[in-house]
Image (cartoon, rainbow, N blue to C red):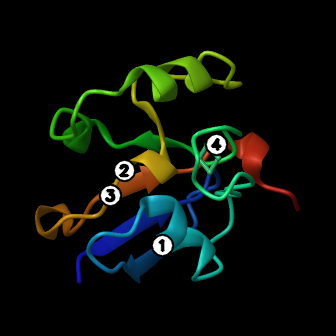
C-alpha cells in the first residue's frame, strides 16, 4: 500500500499506508488523522476535505472535474494546489504523496 504523508497546518506529520482504490479522505478519516473532516462522506458536496497537494505532486494528478472545481470556489484559503481529498483515489504510484491540511479544518 502506498504511504501517504498527511501534514497538518502546524507541521505535524502523519505517515499512513492507504489502500489502493480508496480516497485520500477515507485514508485520513479511517485512521484518525486530523484536519480532513469529510462531512458529506465523499460525495463532493461539503468541501471539508480540502487539502493542499504538494507542488511536486499536483501536476501528476488528473485535472479537476467541474464538481470539484465548483466546490473549491467556496473554499476558504484556497490555493493553486487546492484539491478535495475525497476526489483523489490512491494509486500504486502515489507512494510518498504529500497532502497538507488547512488550518480552518482543525477543530482543536
Ligand atoms: Fe465532502 Fe470531500 S468529503 S467534499
The image shows residue 97, relative to residue 54, as above or below, that is below
Disc 1 element: helix
In the current view of this chain or complex, which residue is farthest to the front? 43
Q: Is residue 22 visible from the viewing direction of this image?
A: yes
The CA span between labels 2 and 1 is 11 Å
Q: State which tag comes first along the sequence, 1 or 3.
A: 1
Q: Is residue 26 left or right of residue 90?
A: right
* Residue 39, x across and y down, in percent: 75, 54
Disc 3 element: loop
Q: Which residue is the site of mark 2? A: 88
- Which is in the foreground here, disc 4 or disc 1? 1
Q: Are marks 2 and 1 in contact (CB under 8 Å)?
A: no
Q: Residues within 10 Å of mark 2 (few under 14, many from 20)?
A: some
Q: Residues within 10 Å of mark 1 (few under 14, many from 20)?
A: many
Mark 2 within 8 Å of ligand 1, using the beta carbon: no
The CA span between labels 2 and 3 is 4 Å
Q: State which tag comes first along the sequence, 4 or 2.
A: 2
Q: 61 and 33: which one is in front?
A: 61
Q: Which residue is the site of mark 3? A: 89
Residue at 25% from the left image edge and 27% from the top image edge = 63
The image shows residue 98, relative to residue 43, as above or below, that is below
Q: Are marks 4 and 1 in contact (CB under 8 Å)?
A: no
Q: Are marks 2 and 3 in contact (CB under 8 Å)?
A: yes
Residue 98: which numbered mark, if any? none
The CA span between labels 4 and 2 is 17 Å
Amino acid at each position: 500500500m502506498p504511504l501517504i504523508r498527511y501534514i497538518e497546518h502546524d507541521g505535524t506529520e502523519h505517515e499512513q499506508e492507504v489502500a489502493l482504490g480508496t480516497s485520500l479522505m477515507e485514508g485520513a478519516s479511517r485512521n484518525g488523522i486530523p484536519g480532513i473532516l469529510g462531512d458529506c462522506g465523499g460525495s463532493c458536496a461539503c468541501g471539508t476535505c480540502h487539502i493542499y497537494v504538494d507542488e511536486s505532486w499536483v501536476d501528476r494528478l488528473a485535472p479537476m472535474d467541474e464538481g470539484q472545481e465548483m466546490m473549491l470556489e467556496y473554499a476558504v484559503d484556497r490555493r493553486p494546489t487546492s484539491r478535495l481529498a475525497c476526489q483523489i483515489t490512491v494509486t500504486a504510484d502515489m507512494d510518498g504523496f504529500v497532502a497538507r491540511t488547512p488550518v480552518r479544518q482543525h477543530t482543536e
